[in-house]
């Protein structure tokens, strides 16, 4: 499974991060699309997820603004771990 952040915006009423997830089996993709609480859609073999952050946005700190690539990579890893653990319930 490969998770990539494709877009984010912290300057809107409800900040969000968009993820694209590839490398999933068809059944895994359908399971995630139907069972995640986040906004999801499937485009061919890519699962798209939009996650909203009402309280704490992962990239809001001053350090994140300086080392944004590091924070993006860490967030991609965290989403990969979350999705993997979610798929264990499949």
Image: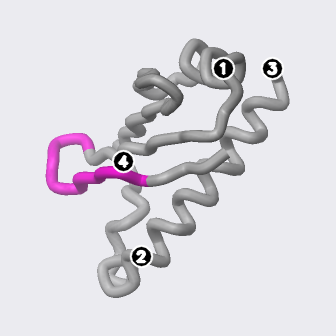
Which numbered disc, 4 or 3, marks the residue that appears first in the sequence? 4
State the quadrant of the C terminus: top right
Mark 1 → mark 2, Cα distance in angstroms: 30 Å
What residue is disc 3 on? 90
Q: Kindly identify the residue that appears in the image at 48 percent across and 53 percent down.
A: 4
What residue is disc 4 on? 17
User: In the image, which is nearer the foreground, mark 1 or mark 3?
Assistant: 1
**Viewer-proximal residue, 55 or 63?**
63
Mark 2 → mark 4, Cα distance in angstroms: 14 Å
Magenta residues? 5-14
Vertical placement of residue 49 versus 29, above or below: below
Q: Kindly identify the residue that appears in the image at 52 percent across and 60 percent down.
A: 75
Residue at the far left in the pictured view:
12
Tag 3 secondary structure: loop
Q: Residue 21: where, in percent of width, then height?
A: 54, 40
Q: Kindly identify the residue that appears in the image at 48 percent across and 77 percent down.
A: 70
Vertical placement of residue 81 versus 48, above or below: below
- To which quarter of the image does residue 89 belong? top right
What residue is disc 2 on? 69
């Amino acid at each position: 499974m490969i998770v990539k952040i494709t877009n984010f915006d912290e300057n809107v009423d409800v900040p969000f991060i968009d993820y694209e997830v590839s490398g999933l089996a068809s059944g895994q993709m359908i399971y995630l699309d139907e069972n995640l609480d986040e906004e999801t859609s499937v485009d061919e073999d890519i699962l798209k997820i939009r996650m909203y952050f009402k309280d704490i946005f992962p990239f809001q700190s001053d350090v994140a603004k300086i080392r944004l690539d590091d924070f993006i990579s860490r967030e991609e890893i965290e989403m990969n771990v979350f999705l993997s653990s979610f798929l264990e319930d499949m």
